Image (cartoon, helix red, strand yellow):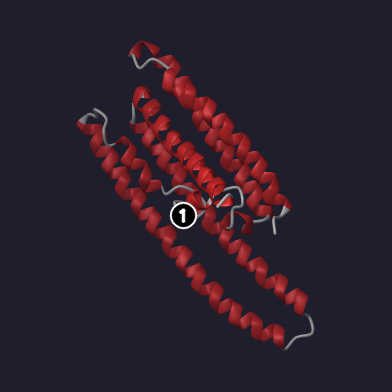
Amino acid sequence: MTSQVGENFRKYFENWMIQLEELLKQLVIVPRETSYVNDHESLVSKMTTHHKDYYTAKWAAAHEDILAFFTPMWLSPLEIVYSWITGWKPSMAFRLVGGGAFSDEQLKNIDGLRVKIRGEEEKVEREMERQQVAIGDRKMVELARIKNSDNNDELVELALKGLRMSLERVMKMADCVRLKTLKGLLEILSPIQSVDFLAAISTIQIQMRKRGRKRMNVAKFN
């Protein structure tokens, strides 16, 4: 059953993706000459603002209904398969900056950031595993309490509140690693390299969405 929060976020996300496609067109057509550095910086700024807006909206909606983000009805099964704790996996971004002409200092900084981000990913994954174990243990305890209580509804809501809070915390941890990855890479890359990087990551997201939707449409008629 779709919640109202999920439905509202679906509409927001559809519009956000349309805007992303428009920004991608600008990233692709802007000349790569260094004389256009002001245009490059302007586009990078627009893209970072667009992503920040997404996380602001996501966190606000998730606070109302975190479960909707762990069963996102606005994503196709293909997108869900490639997602990592309600979004893209941060370490994936480093694959998109491997083919450029980087200075030795840039390469050193990229490698250092990669190691740092991988460590933070593992921290989030451990926390997610810990929460899954805790959720399992909590379910058994709460079920036993509910079975022997007259205040079933109150106990169920209390158990769900703890679950929601735990999942919201893990989601925000994962989102913070995503934002740190974007910020860290954009600080290392030149404006032209940043334009290429943002174009690459946006292209993957848009193409994944189109491919996922196409598969869903084909499945409907089979």
Q: Nearer the viewer, residue 30 or 54?
A: 30
Q: Residue at x 61, y 67 (%)?
A: 163
Horizontal and vertical percent position of residue 10: 65, 44
The x and y percentages for residue 150 are 79, 84
Total numbered circles: 1
Density class for disc 1 (Cα within 10 Å; few <14, some 14-19, many ≥20) is: few
Outermost residue to the right: 150
Residue extending furthest toward the bottom = 148
Q: Position of residue 138 (x, y in %)?
A: 58, 77
Residue at 36% from the left image edge and 49% from the top image edge: 117
Indicate whether 75 appears above or below 185.
below
Q: Secondary structure at mark 1?
A: helix
Q: Residue furthest left?
A: 104
Q: Quadrant of the N terminus?
A: bottom right
Please determine whether, in this image, residue 27 is positioned above or below residue 51. above
Residue 102 appears in which quarter of the rendering? top left
Q: Is residue 214 left or right of residue 147?
A: left
In depth, the one of 29 and 127 nearer the eye is: 29
Mark 1 residue type: Val
Q: Is residue 38 left or right of residue 111?
A: right
Give the x, y percent position of residue 199.
42, 30
Q: Residue at x 66, y 72 (%)?
A: 159
Which residue is found at the position 24% from the left and 27% from the top?
Answer: 101
| Location of mark 1 (residue) | 81
**Furthest residue in direction front, as rendered:** 222
Q: Would residue 197 be found to the left or right of residue 127 on screen?
A: left
